[in-house]
Amino acid sequence: MAGRSLVSRLIWLLCSSMAGLWLLGSVTAGMLTVFEINERLDNAIEEVAQRLLPATYDVVQQPQAMQQMVRQLVATTDPKALAYQIIGPTGEIVMRSDNAPETPFQVPRQTGFHDIPRYRVYAQPAAADGYFVEVAEPAAHRSEALWRAVGLTVGPLLLFLPLSWFLIRWAVFRSMSSLDRLRWEIGHRDGSNLSLIPDMGLPTELAPILAAVNRLLERLGRALAAERQFAANSAHELRTPIAAVRAQMQLLSAQLAGTQHAERAARVVNQIKGLSSLAEKLLQLSRTGAGVGMQQDPVDILTVLQVLVDEFRRREDVGDRLVVNAECRDEFIVLGELDILGITLRNLIENAVRYGAPDEPIEIVIERGRQIRLLNGGAIISSETLEGLKKPFVRGSSVGAGGGLGLAIVDSVMKQIGGSLTLISPVMGRGSGFEARLVFPEPN
């Protein structure tokens, strides 16, 4: 039963145990029924033989009258079920019933029951000396009676099996509902939701598990909060000295212009710019990781996007390359935090500018299905690489000065607001390129 759910295992074990007990009980009931029915039928045969005993005393003197009298004596029995013969001293049939064979039963002349192929015969000495009374029951009649009795005894138990299966399923699912609630609560805990699981009135067997999970969530929450606080404080404290070093280095680079050290100074300035960008991304990542994006304020995403597009179009490396196609020109309301949503879209556009082909356009498509698609040119990215691009410090290529945090920030925010980020390469309908698709939830 490896790989099966706990509920399935319990249902299978209980049902198989119940079926085994039912089979044992049915066999026992059947055997007892067969024993009782045989005993009752044998008693009936013996009773008929006892009723025939007086008829044999005058059977020789008045055979015709006695034949009529015997028929009246056994009128209360089923003539199709029982047959009788009165055997004379020499083995001839003196009297028999209509359904009895014309030849004597092949049984010994001694008191008791005897089984032959088609009958079960009871023999008993008659009142007249030398005569025997033999009463027989057809084997088919007895078999029919036995099967009918066993069917009436065991048959109703057949209804018990499906009924017990439904009852067991109901009882197991009802008993496991508390475990399902606990599993659901644990499954909805992640880096953005480490709240303690409330008391759900669990059984005593599950209460220690809930307490242990809550202790773990509490410790994990403290550890992540300390880590995020450290990253945020470090990034914030580094911004001022990095900006100062950058200003001093830019001044020094200007003074070294035209000398042999000018190129080296320019490289240092670019590296300081990259360090400043990395500190800014770390600060953004710590903010999104702290769950800032969970604020539910209505924001028109089209307004935010237009501001960013105007800003990026003023850059020399972007200009008219940034194209917006809006299928939905009305309001595009998203529940979130204005600053965080702006950071999300900015990172997405920066990723396209930094890693996209510089001679191909960057297209932003706003679709009616609450989707925003950002498409840029470039080489095809393998599916294995796409899977890891949402993780921090993972880049699709070594080209560009990015730190591999932009898409991780976008994915974190989209999960917090209930949306999704999907990465596709190549672009659908093209032979190359990269597409990032944002799907926003409906505002409640």
Image (spheres, helix red, strand yellow):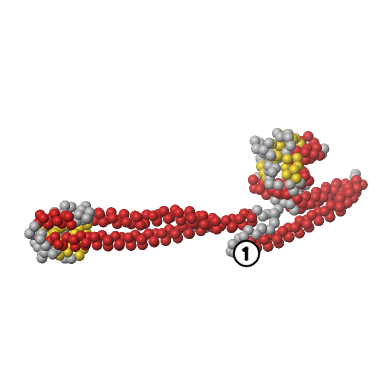
**Viewer-nearest residue: 151 or 417:** 151
* 159 relative to 132, above or below: above
Q: In the figure, is residue 43 to the left or right of 190?
A: left
- Tell me the residue at 78%/58% (across/down): 230
* 287 relative to 306, above or below: below
Q: Which residue is label 1 attached to?
A: 208
- Tell me the residue at 11%/64% (across/down): 128
Amino acid carrying mark 1 in the image: Pro
- Tell me the residue at 86%/50% (across/down): 243
The reply to whether residue 367 is in sight is yes
Secondary element type, mark 1 = helix
Q: Position of residue 423 (x, y in %)?
A: 67, 44
Q: Position of residue 111 (x, y in %)?
A: 18, 65
| Rendering quarter of residue 348 | top right
Q: Position of residue 165 (x, y in %)?
A: 47, 55
Q: Residue at the right extreme? A: 255
Mark 1 Cα-neighbour bin, 10 Å: few <14, some 14–19, many ≥20: few
**Viewer-nearest residue: 11 or 268:** 11
| Rendering quarter of residue 444 | top right
